[in-house]
Amino acid sequence: MSEAAREVKYIFVTGGVVSSLGKGVASAALGALLKARGIDVTILKLDPYLNVDPGTMNPFQHGEVFVTDDGAETDLDLGHYERFLDLNMSQKNNTTTGQIYERILHRERRGDYLGGTVQVIPHVTDEIKKHIRKAAGEDAEYRVVICEIGGTVGDIESLPFLEAIRQFRLDVGRKNSLYMHLTLIPWIPTAGELKTKPTQHSVNKLREIGIQPDVLLARTSHSLTKGIKSKISLFCNVETDAVIEALDVESIYEIPLIYHEQGLDQLVCDMLDIATGAPDLESWTEMVRGVKEPEDEITILVAGKYTDLKDSYKSIDEAFIHAGVPNNTRVVAQHIETDGITRENVAETFTGGHGLLVPGGFGERGIPGKIEAIRYARENGIPFFGICLGLQTAAIEFARNVCGLETANSMEFDLLAEHPIISLMPDQEEVVDMGGTMRLGAYPCQLKEGTKAFEAYGTPLISERHRHRYEMNNRYRDTLEEHGMVISGVSPDNQLVEMIELNDHPWFVAGQFHPEFKSRAQRAHPLFRDFIRAAREYSKKQEG
């Protein structure tokens, strides 16, 4: 191992007691603090499920699928990493049990293991460790790699990953590795007290497999007393100062500041023997103040089809928060299920709403409701923002109700549509496998000057991330434009429609891509920023 490689520091984040405690946010918050200290840091997510990636999962199963520039369909926690660190993640920042076994089985079939038995130890654990090291980049590009282990300690699926990180300390040494465990300290209302026993059991589970946490992040709804911290320290064999309170907060963007107040970043640097100055958190503090203390509040209707699970639209919800800061506005996202929207009740649906966003999705369910909501927003001057499927349904609505093509539809919903405004991309026609075969990742887009899109970005050439199989049918471009639709963004070869908008509307813009994936905590996406600005102006007019 080279000298540079030996100096890479690895932080392993595990979770216990229950799922959904926020390991991803905790990892991202710590990463933001280390970056604020001038340390080059990246984050890796290891997911224990057998799917190769979450790309074929229904959002109800695992939340949204986050897409990176290089076209990886990944866990939604990579969105947190990007938003907090303002760094682009890639395929090397997320792997699954499915990917690990896929690589091992490919080698076995190729003959790499001839004469040997392929086993969990050492083959699976070695492959996991290899991927962890890969995250550090060529020639130790990153000084610190934070590695989040998906699942909950005690799950059988995560055992190979936990064994791999146990071995990892033997490979790199104690000063180059740190175990951080996020756990729950529940408040029992009937007893009127916090209980540490679940945390004790969780830590014992880790110790049974050879991992002793160096730091405990105690997720709790009530502040931890010195006595509680001392008790946790005693029974979990962790220094009292290394028991960090992870108190419930109003905004997740407060978490780095709360961790810093408790000295977590300094503690980590001391344990890993990293010499740095104090973090520069001035701009982060200002951003949090903007999130918590805005002048105005507006409501945006998100007309989706996966609204029963909040994480289905996680990046959109976070992009609203980011966009609210420069507009001095709190954005309330009201998720509405489109199955029940009809021409008769659509006006009632918009009561109290100041803007409409139609997000991405797949399948025919809920499409009539989406189209009806878009019609109402278009005809009543309500700011509208369409994303991916939102562009496609906006084009269908416009073709039906403005161009007079009453049977206009998408081939996704009707293969024999008389007017297929939306058609399957040519390179998708022979595709059989569903996983990782869509138009994925970052692609360039040329913007038309004088449009709202150009005004938002301020540049003629942009790059945005895609995840789709269908596109606007070029045969209908002239018809749509003749009736007033503006094609404001296209691929550089002019073959793909990337953005549309309407001139005779306060703000009606849609993109075939997913701009929410590029919104950052301290750098709102320009389309979201301008959409929220338009919605705020609309709300002022309604009040006046």
Image (spheres, grey):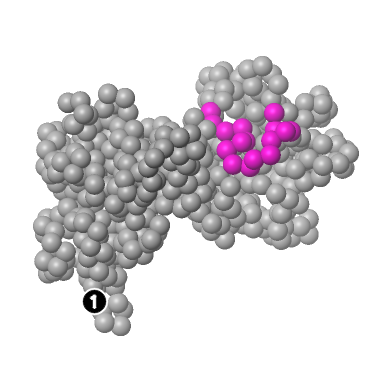
Q: Residue at x 59, y 41 (%)?
A: 435
Q: Main secondary structure of the magenta part?
A: loop
Q: Could you tell me which residue is drawn at 53 percent across and 35 percent down? A: 515
Q: Quadrant of residue 227?
A: bottom left
Neighbourhood count class around disc 1 (C-alpha, 10 Å): few under 14, some 14–19, many 20 upward: few
Res 381 → quadrant: top right
Please give the name of the residue rendered at 66% of the width and 23% of the height, measured from the top-left corner.
490
Residue 506 position, x and y percent, is: 65, 36
Quadrant that contains the N terminus: top left
Q: Is residue 109 visible?
A: yes
Report which residue position mark 1 lands on: 193
Residue 495 image position (x, y, % from top left): 71, 21
Is-magenta flag for residue 194? Answer: no
Q: Nearer the viewer, residue 275 or 191?
A: 275
Judged from this view, the residue extending furthest toward the bottom is: 190
Q: Is residue 489 left or right of residue 93?
A: right
Which residue range is magenta in the image? 427-442
Percent coordinates x, y for residue 538 in the rendering: 59, 43
Q: Secondary structure at mark 1?
A: strand
Question: In this view, which residue lies farthest toward the front?
Answer: 115
> How many circles with numbers are drawn on the protein?
1
Q: Is residue 207 left or right of residue 59?
A: left
> With 180 as the anchor, is 56 left or right in this view?
right
Question: Which residue sits at x=27%, y=47%?
Answer: 165
The residue type indicated by label 1 comes to: Glu
Residue 537 can be seen in this image: no
